[in-house]
Amino acid sequence: MINRDWRPFAYGGLASIAAEFGTFPIDTTKIRLQVQGQVCDAKFREIKYNGMTHALIRISKEEGVKALYSGIKPALLRQATYGTIKIGIYYSLKSIIIKSPHEETLFKNVLCGVTAGVIGSSIANPTDVLKVSVHALQAEKEAYAEKGMLRCFLDIYKHEGLKGLWRGVCPTAQRAAVCAGVELPVYDITKKNLILSGTLEDGVFNHFV
């Protein structure tokens, strides 16, 4: 019987969205640091930021805190799909394969993680393509302001069709397999060992650790 519990999907999606929103300014600074200093493009030739902390402070002062969240919508959309599917499938598969806590092994968790990562990223690939496209415009604030998320999505579909929305799905799925196959099992095994060793109880603090 397939486990029809909806909670791993709902809670996994909400957790992914919350995590994306909380860490997105770091993503913004990463993009700004990556594009600066380009010889081939005069707009980005200047070295404005000395590091991530300096970039966070300077962007906040010169452009406002809102600028740190430029392009947040497609990122949240991606997590609402990919994060929901990935975490939901992972814990649903675990509930089918692992009937009792003592049956849980790292191998089984990795198998569930890899499967969830591949399926989730394959289904949610259009949102990843959209996020990358918006990121390409994010450094050019005016260009993004003119286009917006929906326009970017329609442009991709108009010029490349459905095939364009699944562009790069194979390397994306491979990356997701590695990430989910490490991230989720290590989280579960670490949490379990902290509980079994008596170091921490099964609670919010343990889950954050």
Image (tube, rainbow, N blue to C red):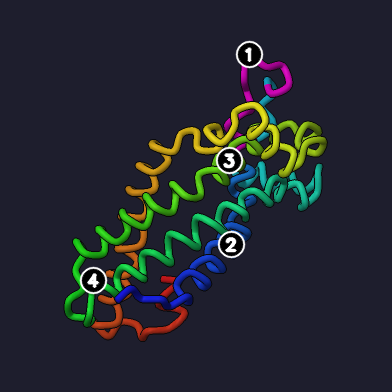
Identify the element where label 1 is drawn: loop
Give the left or right position of residue 169, taking residue 55 as reference.
left
Mark 4 vs mark 2, foreground winner is 4
Q: Residues within 10 Å of mark 3 (few under 14, many from 20)?
A: some
What residue is shown with label 4?
A: 97
Nearest the viewer among 105 and 29 is 105
Q: How many marks?
A: 4
Could you tell me the amino acid type at mark 1? Cys
Q: Earlier in the sequence, mark 4 or mark 3?
A: 3
Q: Secondary structure at mark 4?
A: helix
**Can you say which quadrant of the picture contains the N terminus?**
bottom left
Q: Quadrant of residue 113?
A: bottom left
Looking at the image, do the residues carrying marks 1 and 4 touch, with CB atoms under 8 Å apart? no
Secondary structure category for the residue under label 3: helix
Residue mark closest to the camera, 1 vs 4: 4
Residue range in magenta is 30-44
In percent of the image, x 59 and y 49: which residue is there? 26
Q: Amino acid at mark 4?
A: Ile
Return the residue nearer the eye: 58 or 83: 83
User: Which label's residue is closer to the chain start, 4 or 2?
Assistant: 2
Check residue 34 for magenta coloring: yes
Task: Say if the magenta span includes residue 98.
Answer: no
Residue at coordinates 59% horizontally, 43% vertically from top-left? Answer: 52
Q: Nearer the viewer, mark 1 or mark 2?
A: 2
Q: Counting other residues with Cα less than 10 Å from the Cα at mark 1, is it few (<14), some (14-19), or many (20 or more)?
A: few
- Reading the image, the residue beneath label 3 is 30
| Label 2, residues with CA under 10 Å away: few <14, some 14-19, many ≥20 | many
Q: Which residue is mark 1?
A: 40
Tell which tag, 4 or 3, sits nearer the viewer: 4
Q: CA distance from mark 2 to mark 3?
A: 19 Å
